[in-house]
Image: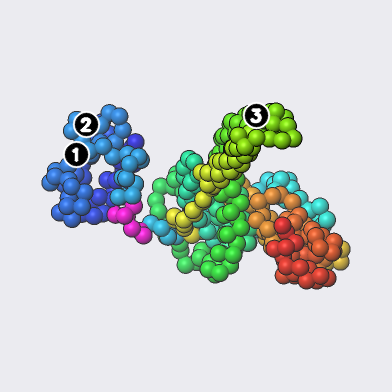
Amino acid sequence: MPMLREFVADLLESEGAVVETVEPDGLEVMAPEVLRTAWGWPELARLGFGATAPIGAIPIGLEGDWLDRLGALLGDRGRLAARQLPRPDGIAPVDDPERRIGRVLDLPNAVWRLASVEPDWSRCLLLAFRYTALSDEKREGLVWLGFNCTTGAVLDAELLTSLRRSLEHAEDWQAPQPEMSRAAGPLADAASIVARTRPLLESLVRADLEPFVAAMRRRLDRDRRRVHLYHDDLRRAALLKLASLERSSGAKASEKAEAAIKRERMRVSAIEREYAAKLDDLRHNYALAVKVEWVQALVLLTPVQRHTLLIKRRKGERSVAMDWHVAARRMEPAPCDWGDGLVRARFVCDDRLHLTDAAGQAPCPSCSKPFCRACHPSCPRCQASIKETTR
């Protein structure tokens, strides 16, 4: 695990340790007294990474509690950073920009026209979140989401991956320069970032957890069928015996027969109660709890080719900016005034020409009046709230 070894070496050196690489997959560390006391290391410790670690080395891996130890040592360092990607020399003009825009933008109820294409800078915010899903099994994952704070667009998964790959391949860490920072504009305020992040994060975590949830539901259905078959057989046998006792006792049942009938009825009730209790146990065992934590934020200044579009709907017209990211060589999606902005289609409202997803222009379920969720916090006819109209 060369990446983990390099990370541990850099982290220990930042804490004042003397580190030397030992092959294969090892480190020799002379750590300060604070680390030696906290982790129980000798004055000269040998660390091993991977299956071919040096003899006598302390094994360091992704399992166990080592990630928690390293995270505690790292603290909040590295959770927020700002970086500028270099602009390559001699950037060629974007070929056939209308075709590139058409790949990421669909306007079912409006038209667009490309007004201009100019080189510029954008300020993007990349956020990483770690989630932990706990049910009968445990699942952990990491999701990335991002926004172009200059244009207001949500960065899709392919664009985010390409930008992160460009960061990995960049040779030097370059801090944002004042001139480019002014051209890119300010970072969005915290309240608007939180408001946009919550629904998008929920969608991304749900999508990432879908295979885990599907497997959990299959196990739940299997266990529920097994419990049902077992108790159904017991109940059917008890009911058959009860029916036989009631037939044999006749109109005038003896005390012994009445006791037997009562006992079988109690047995049927007990089976039904036990079945209900087993179902409650299954619901409790398979209940899903998801915890999401913010891990890292990166403010990224990136060179772009800015495309200015004119959106036309009936007699209205609106200007919208879309960026082609030079480092990723990809066009970002169109901005979205309401919705998560993950789909290609945008619907344009009549009043203020807001761009929304399909649900943002849907009819109200209460009174069937279509209205724009970006324009109105509730249905203008029946005053139903947006939460009620988007269920």
The circle drawn on residue 27 is: none
Q: How many discs mark residues in the rendered view?
A: 3
Residue 87 on image: x %, y %: 51, 53
Q: Is residue 238 visible?
A: yes
- Residue denoted by label 3: 241
Query: Which element type, helix, strand or loop, lies under badge 3?
Result: helix
| Residue beneath the point at 25% across and 50% down | 12
| Residue beneath the point at 18% across and 47% down | 40
- Residue denoted by label 2: 54
Are the two marked residues, 2 and 1, in contact with CB atoms closer than 8 angstroms?
A: yes
| Residue beneath the point at 31% across and 55% down | 72
Mark 3 and mark 2 lie on one chain; the one further toward the N terminus is 2
Q: Is residue 238 magenta?
A: no
The answer to whether 194 is drawn above or below residue 273 in the figure is: below
Q: Is residue 313 visible?
A: no
Which three-letter amino acid code belongs to the residue tagged 2?
Pro
Mark 3 and mark 1 lie on one chain; the one further toward the N terminus is 1
As measured in the structure, the alpha-carbon distance from the residue carrying label 3 to the one carrying label 2 is 71 Å
As measured in the structure, the alpha-carbon distance from the residue carrying label 3 to the one carrying label 1 is 73 Å
In this picture, which residue range is highlighted in magenta? 71-77
- Crowdedness of circle 2 by 10 Å Cα count: few (<14), some, many (20+)? some
| Residue beneath the point at 27% across and 45% down | 9
Query: Which element type, helix, strand or loop, lies under badge 2?
Result: loop
* Residue sitting farthest toward the right: 314
